Amino acid sequence: MIPSYANFGGKIHGGILLSLMDKVAYACASKHAGTYVVTVAVEQVEFLQPVEVGQLVSLLASVNYVGKSSLIVGIKVIAESIKTGIKVHTNTSYFTMVAKDEETNQPTLVPALLLETHEEARRFLEAMKRKELRKSYQDELNNAKTILTVEESLPLLSNERCVFSGSRC
């Protein structure tokens, strides 16, 4: 990682890492799909450890799940100190990619994923569970938005770090 990638604190910008991860997810997914893919979602972006200027960064990617036209790519980011050789796991994220037909730009069928090890089967099953949980979370959030009224919910703000003036509604 070079100095121009860093913020004022000397740590690598999260956006730089996300950009690299997106590129790696694209390469991994398009290789499996055999066609152009686009990113449709990025899940579980938590920076566990900072990446420092001068560290070597490795991005490990695998297709963990495939649907009809979608692929979920897991990416693990490792930062390594050149001087000490110490490696640190900085984050793991999951990118959902969709394969596109290059002529019609419509979603296109991807090949099935061959699971050869228990680890690959575990990753596939975990991806299925994450999809299920994401759907139920989205449904619950949409339901909450539908029934939410500011007037009735104002008491919920009393213990939060905000001040509601109500003057610009």
Image (cartoon, helix red, strand yellow):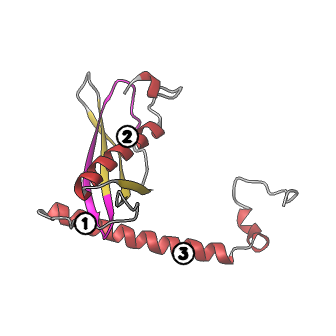
**Earlier along the polypeptide chain: callout 1 or callout 2?**
2
Q: Is residue 146 above or below residue 84?
A: below
- In the displayed orientation, state which residue is furthest to the left: 116
How far apart are labels 2 and 3 at the CA level? 32 Å
Foreground mark, 2 or 3, reads: 2
The N terminus is located in which quarter?
A: top left
Is residue 15 toward the left or the right of residue 83 in the image? Answer: right
SS assignment at label 3: helix
Give x and y (percent) for residue 39: 41, 54
Determine the residue positioned at 17% across, 61% down: 119
Is the C-beta separation of discs 1 and 2 under 8 Å? no
Magenta stretch, residue numbers: 50-72
Q: Inspect the image, locate mark 1, and give the three-letter code of the amino acid beneath it.
A: Phe
Judge the density around disc 3: few (<14), some (14-19), many (≥20) Cα neighbours within 10 Å. few
Query: Does 149 appear above or below 42?
Result: below
* Of callouts 2 and 3, the N-terminal one: 2
**Disc sitting over residue 108 in the figure:** none
Type of the residue with mark 3: Glu
Say the numbered circle drawn on residue 140.
Answer: 3
Determine whether 141 is above or below 91 in the image.
below
Kindly identify which residue carries mark 2. 20
Task: Tell me, for residue 124, which label it has, or none.
Answer: 1
Asked if the stretch drawn in magenta spans residue 71, the answer is: yes
Tell me the crowding category of disc 2: few under 14, some 14 to 19, or many 20 or more residues within 10 angstroms, Cα based.
some
Question: Dot 1 surroundings within 10 Å: few (below 14), some, or many (20 or more)?
Answer: some
